Image (cartoon, rainbow, N blue to C red):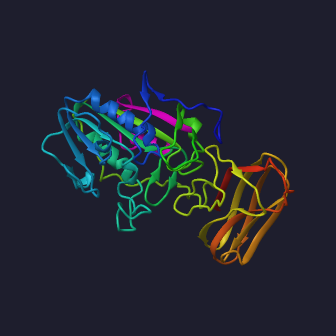
Amino acid sequence: MGLFSSSSYSDIFTFGEKQLHYNRVPINNVSERAIEVPIGLNFLMEHNSKRILEVGNVLQQYIQQPIYGTWNILDKFEVGPDVLNIDLMEYNPEEKYEAIISISTVEHIGQRKDPSGSYGEEDNVRDKETPLKAIVKIYNLLKEGGHALITVPFGKLIDHGWLIHFDDHYMQLLINKYEIPDDELIIKYYRKMEMEMTWNNPRQVWVPCLKENLADTIYDSPFPNANGIAVLEINKKSDKELRIESIKNTDIKFHSPNIINNLYFNYINRFNIPSNHDLDGWIPIRNQGVVFHGPYVELDSGWYTLDFKLETSTNFDFTIDFASNMGTKIIMCHSANGSLELQYCFHLPSPESKFEIRLFNDTVFPRGTVTFPMVRVRKLTLRKL
């Protein structure tokens, strides 16, 4: 069925002992919201008579029935009805909360503006441990006996500038450094296995997994947004408050994000596919010429690696090249006749503008051809060394 696995689509996924329905409300539902929203709404219903805080204004967009009790929403940047525009780290209410929930928010706290410019800090000087400190702050805002549920992107430790992509070493600082008791913290992990190749409310497949299964998982690849998440459940057993500001940052090695993540879902700078593709990623080829090109990114000087895996339905002659300056400068050219895997390392002595990857069909099809070849790109990533 899909491009990356043989998993079949379903209406439900497993969360602990429960079977929850995937979110199908078409609001940002190309992302991990497909499972985060039902997990979050399930948490709200379990605690619907309590004093609740939501950090990040997410769930009220998806509510289809009233939530009883006291529900406060805290979001520094998003203005809306009943939303408190206060920085979580500066929030000190008179009364603590019995339940706190935060969906895909803490990874952004204290980080730079997101690519759309709609939220994030203006100052380039930032604390890369603020997402951890935000989780500790949530812990401190809980009453004794209180519960919290927090979701974050999880896999390889990557600094995206506007978000921190957690890994296990970074996560363990919550216990080993910030001293959240390990018997008060439960973490579940989920991996995205498949998704329809469309931005329009695609069906998805998410499965529970071990943290080790996400060791090489990165943001925006192969699918848009998080490809793995961690769901933290805090069950606070005391009224203790933990230190935050007095703790110095740890020397941690963060990985850099990929420049190009995927042919179909490269974030912001997208590829142009003139003949489009189906929900499994197959691109039909009926004429000579360009099959895809893009995404027109700016590259600094230095060493780069490209991983490319192409699948073809039948053999035909084609060429793939790297070009810059709107196609006027060819950096690499490779000809092939069928499915291929290409790993290429190259050096740019100077910056290149409008860099793109192009695939050309070089085959002339005879008149009367009924069955045309198709291609799909199973992997296309570019990163700077």
Q: In this picture, which residue range is highlighted in magenta?
A: 168-193
Task: Give the residue displayed 35% in from the left and 36% down from the top.
Answer: 40
Is residue 178 magenta-colored?
Answer: yes
Q: Is residue 45 above or below residue 252?
A: above
Number of marks drawn: 0
On screen, residue 372 versus residue 274, left or right, reads: right
Q: Is residue 376 above or below residue 210?
A: below
Q: Position of residue 302 (x, y in %)?
A: 66, 70
Task: Give the residue displayed 50% in from the left and 53% down from the top.
Answer: 252
Residue extending farthest to the top is 17
Residue extending farthest to the front is 368
Q: Position of residue 8 (x, y in %)?
A: 59, 30
Q: Quadrant of the N terminus?
A: top right
Q: Quadrant of the C terminus?
A: bottom right
Is residue 179 magenta-colored?
Answer: yes
Q: Residue 349: which quarter of the image?
A: bottom right
* Camera-nearest residue between 244 and 327: 327
Q: Residue 351: which quarter of the image?
A: bottom right
